[in-house]
Image (spheres, grey):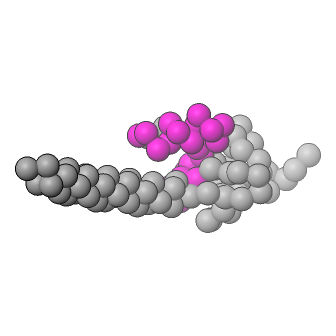
Amino acid sequence: MLPESTSTASGDSSAEVSSHRPCPQCGSLRVYRSHRRGGCERVLRWMGLKIRRCHACGLRFTRYGGSVILIADVERTLRGLVQLAVALAGTLLVVAAMLWLTARQAAD
């Protein structure tokens, strides 16, 4: 049996701890499954990744194999990809309009 001072030294009891893997930022064992927020996290869930949140420092992350993926990094990357896709679509639209106008003028 563990001494009482050891079981409460960190303020966590074994009944409160739901994850055996510590937080990658602060090392706390108070890591729990987190509710999904937004489309990005729904996509991650469809991929089979479980979003976790540390109750000590508030870090939101997921694990893939042995790697830790921070949710903020995923959201930033997806935001950049969406901006790139919008810029590419706009460029294609302008090029298509120029080709159409050129073909129309050549026909006249």
Left or right of residue 83: residue 4: right
In the depicted view, which residue is nearer to us: 15 or 97? Answer: 97
**Does the magenta portion include 55?**
yes
Residue for point 19% across, 52% down: 103
Query: x, y (%) of residue 64?
Result: 70, 51
- Residue 79 visible? The answer is no
Query: x, y (%) of residue 105?
Result: 11, 54
- Residue 21 against residue 80 in the figure, above or below: above
Residue for point 65% across, 53% down: 11
Query: x, y (%) of residue 78?
Result: 45, 54
**Dividing the picture into quarters, in which one does residue 27 lie?**
bottom right
In the depicted view, which residue is nearer to us: 22 or 36? Answer: 36
Residue for point 77% across, 47% down: 20
In the depicted view, which residue is nearer to us: 29 or 100? Answer: 100
- Residue 8 against residue 17 in the figure, above or below: below
Q: Which residues are magenta?
A: 38-61
Query: x, y (%) of residue 94?
Result: 22, 57
- Count the marks: 0
Most extreme residue toward the top, as rendered? Answer: 46
